[in-house]
Amino acid sequence: MTQVDQRPDIDPYPLSPYVAWAGNRNKDPILTAFKEIFPTSGNVLELASGAGLHINYFAPHFSGVHFLPSDYDTDVFDTIESKRADAGNSNVADPIRIDLTDPSTFPDPKDQTFDVIFVINLFQVAPVSIQEGIARLSSSVLAADGFVAIYGPFKRDGHYTTGSNEAFDKEILAAGVTEWGLKDIGELEKAAAPHGLKLARTLDLPANNFILIFDRVR
């Protein structure tokens, strides 16, 4: 068994061994998908960047794209910047603090808009209401033809898509944390709709995960 296969205990703290394990496990499938859908130039914002593993892994593959990491927890900023330095990523900006429940922390669209906004593995340990924050932020700073990409495991139409996802959800729920657990794609659609965003595409990825692509209602 490789190190990547040895799953640590579930711990959503951004610098935990579990988050590092999950990130290393899914970074290549996500990168493959992003290579198909990302623009060749423009601005990309990552929400809940955590340790910065994904954004610093992706950045060298998109030389014409300017990446902006962000997180609620400023304690992770040193780690993001360290990974940026190790990778030599000149197209990754200094991280900024964004609290998805507090619009006063959102970027100012007068300063910059974004062609892509993405978030990875957030909703199994966050309430559906966070989608309202993502949609509200996106309605302000997303470019006219931009999109939001949300990666993770989800239920569909009230049902688990696989037995392994059901088992994973039961394991998460056993922790007894109110906001934890797999969310339904329909719940995210409902939260996004009042802010002018709709689910445009759903991409199937390995390990029974999805990328949900939201864009503006036109």
Image (cartoon, rainbow, N blue to C red):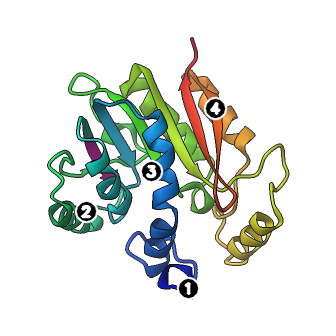
The reply to whether the C-beta atoms of the residues labelled 2 and 1 are less than 8 Å apart is no
Measure how far apart labels 2 and 1 are at the Cα level.
24 Å
Residue type at tag 3 = Leu
Judge left or right: residue 68 versus residue 86. right
Sequence-earlier tag: 2 or 4? 2
Sequence-earlier tag: 2 or 3? 3
Residue type at tag 1 = Gln
- Tell me if residue 59 comes above or below residue 148 in the rendering: below
- Tell me if residue 21 comes above or below residue 215 in the rendering: below
Label for residue 31? 3
Residue type at tag 4 = Arg
- Residue plotted at (66% across, 65% down): 178
Residue type at tag 2 = Ile
Q: Which residues are magenta?
A: 67-71
Residue 97 appears anywhere in the view: no
The reply to whether the C-beta atoms of the residues labelled 3 and 1 are less than 8 Å apart is no
Residue under label 1: 6
Q: Nearer the viewer, mark 3 or mark 4?
A: 3
Residue under label 2: 80
Disc 3 residue crowd, few under 14, some 14–19, many 20+, Cα 10 Å:
some
Q: Nearer the viewer, mark 2 or mark 1?
A: 1
